[in-house]
Image (spheres, helix red, strand yellow):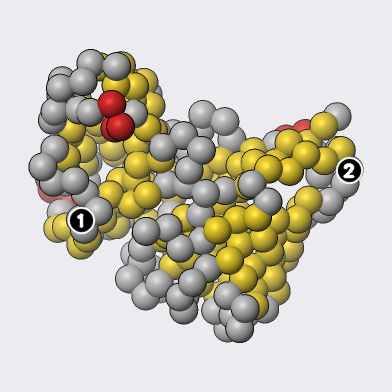
Amino acid sequence: EAGVAQSPRYKIIEKRQSVAFWCNPISGHATLYWYQQILGQGPKLLIQFQNNGVVDDSQLPKDRFSAERLKGVDSTLKIQPAKLEDSAVYLCASKVQLSGRYEQYFGPGTRLTVT
Amino acid sequence: SQQGEEDPQALSIQEGENATMNCSYKTSINNLQWYRQNSGRGLVHLILIRSNEREKHSGRLRVTLDTSKKSSSLLITASRAADTASYFCATELNDYKLSFGAGTTVTVRA
């Protein structure tokens, strides 16, 4: 089975610019997550989707971050405008919605550097 | 907020030795999961232990869970160079969200 795909893998932008990340989850996985992982830390959940609806976006800085999951498949995460502290790896993960299956499958991440 | 905390932050061992890392958490959980992250890569799920389980094995991995102490340990036996990675514990509450710790960086020396 194909894994979670993310693009781009790397992105360098200047502060105050905009950037967008794309994620294609594993086919059939209803739940999709975006995480932010700052160097030396564990992933921090930004937003959780169930199909195309938002389940939890309590930790998403909504003044600059937005995310959508049209048609309940692919998802995009946008930052506008970026700040220096947004430099991190942005991970997308998906999870199958089956009883007894709890593990999340992660993509390779997008490494963002804001200069 | 991140619920899990791993200890130690870093661990360096000789190939063939065992590696043990611990995770403590704060609130009641549905299950606890361990993930591995190789440098520059995404996380890979290793093992899950439910709140009503005390010990679980998977290949060279052994996980214990003590819900009274709110702690878990991950043991990797007979370590290999390929085990060099960061290891994260993640606690799942009843809402399918994972809360990750800061991780333990393991270096296996040849």
User: How many C-alpha atoms fall within 10 Å of the one at disc 1: few (<14), some, or many (≥20)?
Assistant: some
**Residue A55 x, y percent position in the rendering:** 20, 62
Frontmost residue, A83 versus B53 = A83
* Vertical relation: B88 (above or below) A13: below
**Residue A60 x, y percent position in the rendering:** 21, 49
Instruction: Name which residue type carries label 1.
Output: Asp
Frontmost residue, B13 versus A29 = B13
Q: Are marks 1 and 2 on the same chain?
A: no
The Cα–Cα distance between marks 1 and 2, rounded to whole angstroms, is 44 Å
User: How many C-alpha atoms fall within 10 Å of the one at disc 2: few (<14), some, or many (≥20)?
Assistant: some
Q: Which mark is residue B16?
A: 2
Question: Badge 1 sits on which subunit?
Answer: A
**Residue that label 1 marks:** A57
* Vertical relation: B46 (above or below) A36: below
- Residue under the image location 52 percent in, 49 percent down: B102
**Residue B63 x, y percent position in the rendering:** 69, 65
